[in-house]
Image (cartoon, grey):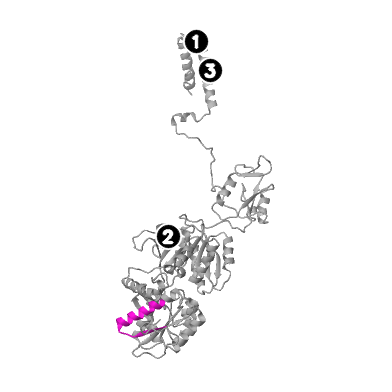
Amino acid sequence: MVSGNHETGRNASATMIVGEKGRIGAIVDVSSRIGKEEILAMHMAIEDFNSLSNQNFSLVIRDSRNDPNLAALAAKDLITVQQVQALIGPQTWEMASVVAEVGNENQIPVLALANEIPKWATERSKFLVQASPSQLNQMRAIAGIVSSGDWHLVNVIYEDSDLSTNGVFLYLVHALKDVGAEVGQFVGLSQFDSDLFSELEKLRRGSSRIFVVHMSFKLALRLFEIANEMGMMGKDYVWITTDSFTSLVHSFNVSINSILQGVVGVKSYISERNPPYHEFYLRFCQRFRLEHFDEHNNEPGVFAVQAYDAAKTAALAMSEIQDKGNDLLDKIKLTDFQGLGGKIQFKDRKLAPADTFQIINVIGRSYRDLGFWSDKLGFSQDLQENSSSSLLMKELDNVFWPGGSLKTPRGWVVPTDSAPLRIGVPTNSMFKQYVRVEEDPTGNNLTFNGLAIDLFKAMLDYLPFAPHVFCPFNGTYNDLVKEIYLKNFDAAIGDIAITTKRIGHAEFTHPYSEVGLVMIVPTRKDTSNKALLFTKPFTVTMWILIAVVTAYNGFVVWFIERNHCPEHQGSMFDQAGAMLCSSFTTLFSLHGNRRHH
């Protein structure tokens, strides 16, 4: 590919073209989608700069073939033969590190496009400049996704050839810890691994169904293809991809998207409201379609934007100074302009880290933008300061999870290779309401009931425990707890008091009730009929007894006074009324003379 004075051939002449002011070298993987976007973007950057500033810089491309050794040889050729004044390095830290060594030896600034560069690397390589923003903050976005699903155990699958992952995963571990989650397994894979199936099978046997994938495009796609064949891209699984894979989602064809259904990804954000980017976008799509008609999509990704800004950075610095080495490096460090992807300004030879990401969901023939995650707002539908935001994904559009479900997966299953838990249960409990062991009517099996049993079963609905079996135990409670210490039981349940002796053999859960003074009262029936509340102090039998005694007292009074008191004489109806009246007066009235002390 040749555009103007931009040389890409291996045997390009080292002689400067007449009127040519300087050369910029670039090392890319020419055959990859990232490489294709970077090459076109850098060509466009140099062309735009030359036309606007009346300069005549040229771009010389070398193919790394994704090999660090070839990248080092390409760097030496560009510096010694092509006499470039600055190098734009490859995407991965492995290749960027060897190119930086060559640049450092020859005092040629290297603008690395690797997202993560260890701090010690910039300290050791004076001429190394990180020309792409750090993506570490995406780990906080991933932790937010994990927290939104109320998941607590995550498996991380990564490319073990990427030496920058140590710092990345340290950041991820801390971010997960902040939301109450942790990493169950770190699984490192290589593009040379022939048996990805066995590694995925080990993960499938475990309990966690949450997977974070941090890999290059080729290896990640291979991983997803095998996972799909194993049925691991279906219901109950959750796959979260990092920017290194997700930022190429615009280039995926239908066959790739059919494998990735339900995948949630974190993607670098580029503001499309930026007028220069919009103009670049239109020109890029037109030229990319002509040069790469075999590609499914012609849109530029974040890698094209970063390459454009890096090439413009080198050209700006070279236009202000003829020399190379320290003087050119100093000019690069003083760079300050608004690039396509944001502010281009270096601090300690690094750009400010990215703090905003898009959250996408692969569904159907393409993908959906669910919303954003930003350092300031958390999750939100847009990036306006007054927009609704949350630390959880509830502010975003609904997610279609693997299997096509809108319901958030539980995130764990019972491990297929785990032995059942052996749960000791006392058979001689004094409080049958807590635990009761009985034989069924056939006498062949035991049934386990009670509050402790019910609580244990309810707990299992929320925890990834293996199947369990209840084991009756007829010894003392001290011996029962000691069986846990001896590994004969995995746990014990029942009305087991916490004592000093027992606590040395096992850990105890919280008591059934809070510590303190409590009152146990029987449950009461509905008292909505308040007119009868006065009857509640006594039982029905007691009320009947009171009525009988009262009637008897009235009868005795009537019988004694019937011949002496005119009120107790007359018809039978009058005498019955007088007797009833006497019954109540003897109950509530004072008879006889009032006594005084």
Quadrant of res 321? bottom left
The quarter of the picture where residue 440 lies is: top right
Do residues under tags 2 and 3 come within 8 Å of each other at their CB atoms?
no
Magenta range is 38-60
Q: Quadrant of the N terminus?
A: bottom left
Q: Are marks 1 and 2 in contact (CB under 8 Å)?
A: no
Gap in Å between the C-alphas at discs 1 and 3?
Answer: 15 Å
Residue 147 among magenta residues: no
Q: Is residue 485 left or right of residue 158?
A: right
Q: Position of residue 65 (x, y in %)?
A: 49, 79
Which residue sits at x=41%, y=86%? Answer: 84
Viewer-side label of 1, 3: 3
For residue 43: magenta?
Answer: yes
Secondary element under disc 1, as helix, strand or loop, is loop
- The answer to whether one can see residue 278 in this image is yes
Judge depth for marks 2 and 3 and give the one in front.
2
Question: Cα distance, mark 1 to mark 2?
Answer: 90 Å
What amino acid is labelled 2 in the image?
Leu
Marks 2 and 3, the one that precedes in the sequence? 2
Picture residue at 67% right of the left edge, 56% below the top: 487
Where residue 526 appears, as percent x and y from the top left, is: 48, 35
**Number of numbered markers:** 3
Sequence-wise, which precedes: disc 1 or disc 3? 3
Residue 471 x %, y %: 66, 49
Read off the residue under disc 3: 552
Q: Identify which amino acid the numbered label 1 is placed on.
A: Arg
Q: Secondary structure at mark 3?
A: helix
What residue is disc 2 on?
Answer: 391
The disc label shown at residue 562, or none: 1
Q: Earlier in the sequence, mark 1 or mark 2?
A: 2
| Badge 2 element | loop
